[in-house]
Image (tube, helix red, strand yellow):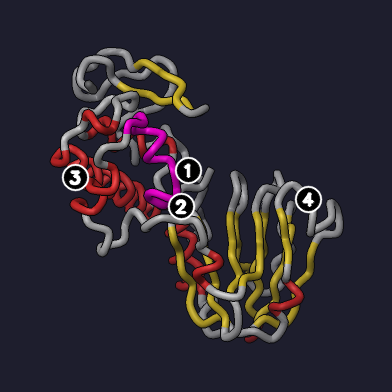
Amino acid sequence: MPELPEVESLRRYLVREGIVGRSVEQIELETKPSPESGTGAISGTVNLQGKTVKTLERRGKQLAAVLDQGVLGLHMGMTGQVNVLEANEPTPRFTRALFSLSGGFRMALVDPRRWAQLRYFESLDQAFSGLGPDALDPKFTAKYFAQNLKGRTAQIKPLLLNQSIIAGVGNIYADEALHRVKISPAKRTNKISAKKLEDLLVAIRESLERALEFIQNHPDDRGRPYIVDAYDDRMQLHRKPGSFCPRCEIPLVTLKLGGRTAYYCSNCQK
């Protein structure tokens, strides 16, 4: 699933390609399954006609195009991507929505599994409803993060994946950050010191920023960002069977927590 670094890379790509300041002229949607009730959802697009994109915002893993009236929320699901098309370029396979904007600008929501979502909202607050502070927001301090988690008895990794607590931390980056600060994903949060929790937020940001830099430096041949691969060089911790701890070189172990698989080192993560 696209995580914060992938979604932020997508946001920067769309801004760089020139989406901001353009007006929506036409929207073409696939007709099956129903755009309103498919596996993903495409709703309220009739409200976009004639609207102009003012800014493109992100919180966590979600994008939002702020219009001169209303907001278009974009969630990429597992396989969604937005491609800016060149003049006369054929519509890509698996296009679920094709947007024609002013100045001949065209972009396609491409999603083989139909899990991406497009929704119209009245405001940015509504589009980002339920999301906690963004993991890379400089106003979200390590001290506040530690205070927010202090006293919670839940295991630390499921809390990191709770988007209402911190928006943008996914499965692989939670494992990466916990390994950096030598914390077991199964450790009860109230057993972790405030200093260690502050260090954890620093590690989360280091992991996300390292991944963002990697993606920016490895676009496809059209300059577009791509979907996450947990096995490339953005990760210190390679989450696959047979992987070894990069620190003490013993085999990693796995554990199911909250329905997600955690990879960690039983020796250096306590």
Q: Which residue is mark 3?
A: 198
Q: Give left or right: position of 135 versus 101.
A: left
Confirm whether the magenta stretch covers residue 8: no
Which residue: 53% across, 43% down? Answer: 1
Residue 6: mark:
2
Q: Main secondary structure of the magenta part?
A: loop
Q: Is 12 or 46 nearer to us in this picture?
A: 46
For the residues carrying marks 1 and 3, which lies nearer the camera in this image? 3
Provide the residue span drawn in magenta: 153-167
**Where in the figure is residue 73, as x and y percent of width and height?**
59, 65
Give the distance between the C-alpha atoms of the residues marked 1 and 3, in whole angstroms. Answer: 26 Å
> Earlier along the polypeptide chain: callout 1 or callout 3?
3
Q: Give left or right: position of 31 versus 76.
A: right
Q: Which residue is mark 1?
A: 228
Quadrant in the picture for residue 235: top left
> Earlier along the polypeptide chain: callout 2 or callout 3?
2
**Where in the figure is residue 253, as x and y percent of width and height?**
36, 15
For the residues carrying marks 2 and 3, which lies nearer the camera in this image? 3
The disc labelled 2 sits on which kind of residue? Answer: Glu
Circle 3 SS class: helix
Give the distance between the C-alpha atoms of the residues marked 2 and 1, in whole angstroms. Answer: 7 Å
Q: Which residue is mark 4?
A: 38
Give the distance between the C-alpha atoms of the residues marked 2 and 3, in whole angstroms. Answer: 25 Å
**Circle 4/circle 1 CB separation < 8 Å:** no
The disc labelled 3 sits on which kind of residue? Answer: Glu
Compared with residue 138, is residue 65 higher up or lower down, i.e. above or below? below
